[in-house]
Image (spheres, helix red, strand yellow):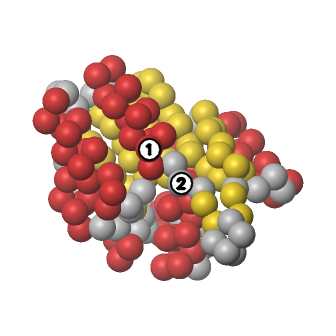
Amino acid sequence: MEKVAIFADVQNIYYTTRQHYRRQFNYSAFWSTATANREVIAALAYAIDKGDSKQRSFQQTLRIIGFDVKLKPYIQRRDGSAKGDWDVGITLDVIDHAPKVDVVILLSGDGDFDVLLAKIRHVYPVTTEVYGVSALTAPSLIHASDRYIPIDDKLLL
């Protein structure tokens, strides 16, 4: 049985599915698909915490599905812009888990992760899978992965 580690860039998946489909991502359907006949070694979901009850309910749903949820506070800057980025945290966790698994699964369309996937594929005997919205996933990320799975109706609510 393949050992897998899953890394979900919650903000990226939320905004890309909302922008392209005007729908939400179905984490339960994803889990069923991605983990079938596989042993989950780690499943981490990275989110920004604004502290509202709807968000806490969603985070609890992710935990029930099987994710460990990592939260970072939402920061509103004085100029009106916002900060809440998990790229470094995701990268460090992927590097920590890659030697322990057969497959690294990334839910994100963020092209910043292309170098990370290329690096772990070069250093470890690991396969990489990326789930993302086709129209909004960086071509460099698709190219850097071993397997790209587009988010479509089967993975949407």
Q: Position of residue 29 (x, y in %)?
A: 53, 52
The residue labelled by disc 2 is: 85
Classify the position of the N terminus by image quarter: top left
Classify the position of the C terminus by image quarter: bottom right
**Front residue of 47 and 130:** 47
Amino acid type, mark 2: Asp
Q: Residue at image x 19%, y 27%?
A: 124
Quadrant in which residue 39 is drawn: top left
**Front residue of 12 and 39:** 12
The residue labelled by disc 1 is: 88
Q: Residue at image x 18%, y 59%?
A: 143
Amino acid type, mark 1: Val
Secondary structure beneath disc 1?
helix
Q: Position of residue 106 (x, y in %)?
A: 39, 47
Q: Position of residue 134 (x, y in %)?
A: 34, 71
- Please say whether residue 33 is visible from this viewpoint: no
Q: Is residue 80 left or right of residue 23?
A: right
Q: CA distance from mark 2 to mark 1?
A: 8 Å
Q: Are marks 2 and 1 in contact (CB under 8 Å)?
A: yes
